[in-house]
Amino acid sequence: MKRKVLFYSFFILVFLLLQTTLLHYAAIMGVIPNILVVFIIITGLLRGNIEGGIVGFFAGLAVDLLFGGVLGFYALLGMYLGIAAGSVNRRLFRENLLVAVFFTFVYSVLYEFLIYVINNIMSGNMQYLYALTDVILPESVYNSIIALLMFPLLIRVEGWFEGKESKLRKY
Amino acid sequence: MSFITIILLVVMGVSANKSSKLNWLNNILSVPMKPVQGFFTTVGRKVEGTFSFFKDIEAVRKENEQLKIQIAGLEKENRELSVLKIKNDELRQALSLKEQFGDYSILGSNIIAVDPGNWFNVFKIDMGSKEGVKTDAPVVTSARGLVGRVVSSDLTTSNVQTIIDEKSSVSGWIAKAGGGHAIVRGDMQLKEKGLCKMDYIPLEVDVEVGDIIETSGLGGIYPKGILIGEVIEVRKTNSELDRYAIIQPAADFKRLEEVYVLKNNQSNETGSAGK
């Protein structure tokens, strides 16, 4: 348990650091991937909705603390994202790479669209179509590619959790 | 889950108020992260810089020769201009005009991190309320082109919203005879190219390509007369009321590394920084 908390905190901090600094050099057509979102989604898929929700909450909270306008906005969305990704868990073979890539794409689209709508709904200047075709879809494709790389890493980490932890999972 | 949702909604409501004590929580992460983020950003720039270094070396040599010739010419010009400057200063005093940023002191700072998403054009600088940076302080480049304003400041870092951010709008002044006020705002489609949009152009003002846009001083955030940029295109739709202009900001947002915060000296004493 202690090890798990350490691992998740480590991943969140490292991904957040990369996200806010070096990743901007990897922009394609002005769009950067969101590796924190990929991390939340894959954690949700692999570990279920409770761990997904917790990781999403803390990853979002970290973004809030560093960049958020209001405290709790990204924490709430991140938690929902983790729970949503975790809820797919039992119906599909979760250790399949393609399943992970597919759901990363779908949830990235939903997540980013939600952020866009919430942030712009009062502005009267909505450009849904442009946002979708020029930001959300490219970013989601990019996220899926990141998922392709991140999934094997997290599968390994998960195997490690499972090996060390007793089989008594409480959900 | 619904319990956490309600709690978070309350927290969001409370922290929406900028003066709320809750916003002090931001320091938990932003203070220890500052050196690490600074390090990563510097490393990224170094790597990028090394690559371009090899590419540029030949070009630089040629450029150097040209520049030397140019410098000689400019030095002469400079001497002539300094005479004009003295004359200008005298005339200014005669008109008792205030120095442009007379009430402000300038604080240099580095960009250490950028907003994690694709939606906002916000970045983090390594100066915070400890150094006296406050919300709404204007931020400019070394050439005094407008960058944006501080939207929040923690103990050692602050977040700066650029003028190409979608949520930003600045009251601009079309600086020419018969100029007028207009609103310069960020636009989602233009911000990728580092441009912004100017609308609400008064009917009687004849905007042309090449017009210089400055801050108007209305709204109380930006002092009057900071250079925003230059009009590069005027788009007319079917009605005259609907026209807007595209502005090339004086600041190059892709290459921005160092920015300067204008600190208002007058409100410094009454401020509650560090409370």
Image: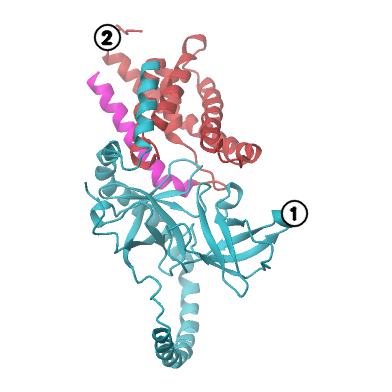
Chain colours: A red, B cyan
- Vertical comparison of B168 with B67: above or below: above
Q: Residue at x 45, y 93 (%)?
A: B80
Q: Residue at x 29, y 43 (%)?
A: B30
Q: Residues in magenta?
A: A1-26
Number of residues whose C-alpha sits closer than 10 Å to that of mark 2, classed few (under 14), some (14–19) or many (20 or more): few
- Number of the front mark, 1 or 2: 1
The quarter of the image holding the N terminus of chain A is top left
Disc 2 marks which residue? A166
Res. A159 mark: none
Q: In the image, A72: left or right of B249?
A: left
Question: Which amino acid type is shown beneath numbered disc 2?
Answer: Ser
Please state which of residues A67 and A39 is positioned toward the viewer in this rendering.
A67
Residue A15 seen in this snapshot: no
> Do discs 1 and 2 share a chain?
no
Question: Horizontal and vertical percent for residue B181?
Answer: 57, 63
Disc 1 marks which residue? B237
Q: Residue at x 41, y 50 (%)?
A: B123
Number of residues whose C-alpha sits closer than 10 Å to that of mark 1, classed few (under 14), some (14–19) or many (20 or more): few
Q: Pointer 2 indicates a residue of which chain? A: A
Please state which of residues A19 and B29 is positioned toward the viewer in this rendering.
B29
Q: Secondary structure at mark 1?
A: loop
Residue B205 seen in this snapshot: yes
Question: Horizontal and vertical percent for residue B108?
Answer: 32, 63
Q: In the image, A142: left or right of B89?
A: right
Q: In the image, B241: left or right of A21?
A: right
Q: Secondary structure at mark 2?
A: loop
Q: What whole-number distance in Å separates the C-alpha atoms at marks 1 and 2?
A: 68 Å
Count numbered badges in the picture. Answer: 2
Q: Is residue A17 magenta?
A: yes
- Vertical comparison of B153 with B147: above or below: above
Question: Horizontal and vertical percent for residue B14?
Answer: 34, 33
Question: Horizontal and vertical percent for residue A45?
Answer: 45, 19
